[in-house]
Amino acid sequence: MTSRNDDNNWLDSRAVTRDFDRAAGTYDKVAVLQRAVLERLFERLDVIRLKPERILDLGSGSGAAAAGLARRYRRAQVIQLDIAHGMLRHARRRAPRWFSRQRFVQADVAQLPIAPASIDFVFSSLMLQWVADLPGVFAQLRRSLRADGLIQFASFGPDTLKELRASWAAVDDSPHVNPFVDMHNVGDALVQVGFSDPVMEADTFHLTYSDVHALMRELKQLGAQNGLSDRRRSLTGVQRLRAMVDAYNAAWRQSDGRIPASFEVVYGHAWVPAQPPQQRTADGDVHVPLTSLKKRAER
């Protein structure tokens, strides 16, 4: 069984890129859940005082989040960063042609091409589940953010697609559904790299589909396919697929004939401290940088 804790090579980034490139033309048509999550992220911003000059939309996809951020923070430059060229091409069509402050960067978040202390606000909606080394990416984002900078995100939690995962497990031992990180581990990773005051919440969406094939077809149209490095590379056999569908129906099919699918969404935000952190020496004394004392005296 694949685990995020095994190593940082559990995800095949080339497969992820390919799948999202192919899904660029169909993504918006089926992204109902993604739009709902985006709305909830924006609602959380209503109670946060923020006047960013530069925003990084991490895993910007088709550009829906960037469009909303540009409307909300009209003076800010919005940088759309995505690993898939097809998604960025789609996002360019969505952006205003004239006087746009949006920028487009194709890059892997594992090698973030952003200068240190150059961003005020990092926003990411349903992308971090595709990150192999989450603490490593958080560390890069921490360096890229200015003092008092904010990171806000939504990602999928471990109960996402639990029905599909269990149904495949009844058929074979190969991994078919990506592992998703627990909310508490996300919060720990933020603190580990120097973020402060993390706030984590979780919510679960229960969607229904006409059948298992409709669910799998939607996941493909979203680009959300099996990106695991140790996935089975051959085509899924008809008999195994039929056995998985039978297992799904036997365990989960509702009285109306539809099948459910769970999506656990983890929401979080954290800040870059305005002051350098206190450092404790080997003998137990607390060292406070002189620059920090000066800044406090000036307030």
Image: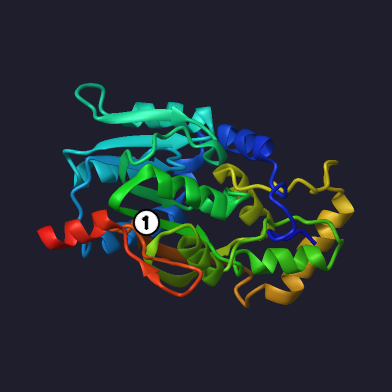
Q: Which quadrant of the structure image shows residue 108?
A: top right
Q: Total number of numbered labels? A: 1
Residue 54, visible in the rendered structure = yes
Q: Position of residue 182 (x, y in %)?
A: 57, 68
- The residue to which callout 1 is attached is 152
Q: Position of residue 10 (x, y in %)?
A: 72, 50
Horizontal relation, residue 54 to residue 241: left or right: left
Horizontal relation, residue 230 to residue 278: left or right: right
Name the element at disc 1.
Answer: strand
- The N terminus: image quadrant: bottom right
Q: Which quadrant of the structure image shows residue 166?
A: bottom right
- Image point (46%, 75%), residue name: 284
Q: Nearer the viewer, residue 139 or 176?
A: 139
Residue type at the position of mark 1: Gln
- Image point (89%, 54%), residue name: 239
- The C terminus: image quadrant: bottom left
Residue 207, visible in the rendered structure = no
Q: Position of residue 232 (x, y in %)?
A: 83, 47
Horizontal relation, residue 57 to residue 241: left or right: left
- Image point (29%, 51%), residue name: 147
